[in-house]
Image (spheres, rainbow, N blue to C red):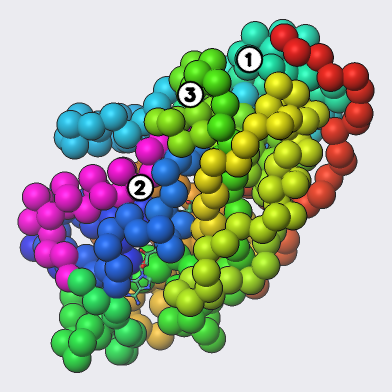
């Protein structure tokens, strides 16, 4: 039986450990904090699952495959991890990210519908369509209960025989060293999210930024579902309604300040709150004065082009690096684990675009991630 050590029990590592166990591997999973902990990128309550990825077919297929695997996982876990609320994109341009996405969704037979600006208000208790060219609705998309999902993955991996080792691992040649014990295996995979560049400073080109998320108190009509998740790609903002009573989520998606994932406090900025409020005033006018009821700050592990990092270590046979979620990785967890399992078993070679070579910054796979245009002002309209 092949043996693997996976370091890091975020969604990438936990999904991989679970998948390898299903495929008959003997697996050890090392995690330095409690699985699902709030310092990790995977430790938020909610993550959007959408299939639109502009013109990129690989990620579209991966997200669609992941959706099925998340549903299988729900059955195995006996809990609802995927909330099928749908996700709506507010397209500011007729020929932008959303139109590119639409073409790929059609080819891949992923359900979608185009909605006229004046009809988008049917999906939200309050909505101002000003500045929107059209909306792209993915009715089969939705929201993952992220923290719950990671904890479920680790629990299920354990039930499938994965040995869970608490502790901080250090690279030691081809092994992972934990508290002086050298863990060796046929494959050692470092799936360490925002910690990866510190562990492999000469190899990994990942920037770690702090990203703040804001939750606002709202009436029951804002519950998700039925209120869908939403993304304003060019405006670099996304969110969802009130899931599980946490409040309406609004997340400005500009790249934040650098973050030390262990030591820095998770204190969301007032500037970000104001940005979120400004967006609500314009897009969701009834929430203009909604009280702030919570915040979260999580690390993005950003590659230069927002493609993932999936690469063998250039010097140590059997050692792999997995990460670079770049603010959009969660949804892919189980599908990425399938892909990586195949690579570890030698079924295929890794795609060079996921490699360690320097990359050219490109179209972001998350949101534009920059200021973009602002939503033009107009008299607010409630629907
Ligand atoms: C605010 C925010 C919003 C996001 N929204 C979305 C979204 O809507 N949809 C989406 O798909 N994605 C989203 N993402 C991205 C997604 O959450 C990440 O891409 C994904 O969670 C990355 O998972 P990971 O396993 O690579 O990293 P992490 O979740 O950070 O996990 C890495 C784990 O490795 C452990 N570790 C590190 N070093 C060691 C060591 N030496 N020894 C032992 N353990 C170690 C850490 O403790 C941690 O648990 C968002 C991210 C953030 C921050």
Q: Is residue 351 left or right of residue 166?
A: right
Q: Position of residue 102 (x, y in %)?
A: 66, 24
Secondary-structure class at tag 3: loop
Residue in view at x 80 percent, y 29 percent: 282
The secondary structure making up most of the magenta span is helix
Is residue 25 among what the camera can see?
A: yes
Distance from the alpha carbon under mark 3 to that under mark 1: 11 Å
Q: Position of residue 298 (x, y in %)?
A: 52, 58
Q: Label 2: which residue?
A: 147
- Mark 3 CB in 8 Å range of ligand 1? no
Tell me if mark 1 has few (under 14), some (14-19) or many (20+) residues whose alpha carbon lies within 10 angstroms of its own. some
Q: Label 1: which residue?
A: 125
- Counting residues from the start of the chain, the first of labels 3 and 2 encountered is 2
Q: Position of residue 120 (x, y in %)?
A: 69, 14
Q: Is residue 19 left or right of residue 11?
A: left
Secondary-structure class at tag 2: helix
Task: Tell me the magenta residue range.
Answer: 143-165
- Mark 1 CB in 8 Å range of ligand 1? no
**In the image, is residue 124 above or below residue 229?**
above
Tell me if mark 3 has few (under 14), some (14-19) or many (20+) residues whose alpha carbon lies within 10 angstroms of its own. many
State yes or no: residue 146 in magenta.
yes
- Counting residues from the start of the chain, the first of labels 2 and 1 encountered is 1
Q: Which of 102 and 328 lies nearest the eye of the viewer? A: 328
- Counting residues from the start of the chain, the first of labels 3 and 1 encountered is 1
Q: Position of residue 107 (x, y in %)?
A: 57, 23
Task: Using the image, tell me which numbered label, if any, was put on residue 224.
Answer: 3
Camera-near label (2 vs 1) is 1
Looking at the rendered image, the quarter that the N terminus falls into is: bottom left
Q: Are marks 2 and 1 in contact (CB under 8 Å)?
A: no
Q: Which of 227 and 342 lies nearest the eye of the viewer? A: 227
Tell me if mark 2 has few (under 14), some (14-19) or many (20+) residues whose alpha carbon lies within 10 angstroms of its own. many
Residue in view at x 84 percent, y 19 percent: 380
């Amino acid at each position: 039986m092949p043996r693997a050590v996976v370091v890091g029990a975020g969604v990438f590592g936990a999904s991989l450990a679970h998948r390898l166990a299903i495929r008959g591997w003997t697996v050890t999973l090392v995690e330095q904090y409690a699985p699902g902990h709030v310092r990790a990128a995977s430790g938020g309550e909610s993550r959007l699952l959408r299939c639109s990825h502009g013109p990129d077919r690989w990620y579209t297929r991966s997200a669609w495959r992941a959706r099925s695997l998340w549903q299988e996982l729900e059955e195995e876990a006996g809990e609802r991890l995927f909330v099928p609320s749908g996700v709506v994109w507010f397209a500011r341009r007729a020929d932008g990210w959303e139109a590119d996405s639409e073409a790929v969704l059609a080819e891949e037979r992923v359900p979608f519908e185009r909605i006229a600006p004046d009809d988008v208000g049917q999906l939200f208790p309050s909505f101002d369509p000003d500045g929107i060219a059209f909306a792209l609705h993915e009715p089969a998309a939705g929201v993952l209960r992220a923290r719950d999902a990671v904890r479920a993955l680790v629990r299920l991996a354990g039930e499938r025989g994965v040995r869970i080792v608490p502790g901080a691992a250090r690279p030691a040649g081809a092994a992972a060293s934990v508290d002086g014990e050298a863990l060796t295996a046929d494959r050692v995979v470092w799936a360490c999210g925002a910690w990866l560049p510190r562990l492999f400073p000469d190899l990994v080109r990942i920037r770690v930024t702090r990203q703040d998320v804001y939750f606002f108190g709202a009436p029951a009509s804002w519950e998700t579902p039925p209120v869908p998740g939403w993304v304003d790609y060019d405006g670099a903002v996304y969110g969802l309604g009130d899931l599980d009573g946490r409040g309406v989520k609004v997340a400005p998606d500009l790249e934040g300040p650098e973050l030390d994932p262990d030591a820095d406090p998770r204190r969301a900025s007032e500037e970000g709150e104001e940005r979120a409020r400004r967006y609500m005033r314009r897009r969701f006018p009834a929430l203009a004065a909604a009280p702030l009821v919570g915040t979260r700050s999580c690390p993005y592990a950003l590659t230069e082009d927002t493609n993932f990092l999936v690469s063998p270590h250039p010097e140590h046979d059997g050692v792999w690096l997995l990460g670079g979620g770049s603010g959009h990785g969660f949804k892919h967890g189980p599908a990425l684990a399938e892909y990586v399992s195949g690579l570890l078993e030698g079924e295929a070679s890794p795609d060079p675009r996921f490699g360690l070579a320097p990359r050219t910054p490109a179209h972001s796979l998350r949101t534009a991630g920059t200021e973009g245009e602002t939503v033009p002002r107009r008299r607010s309209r409630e629907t």
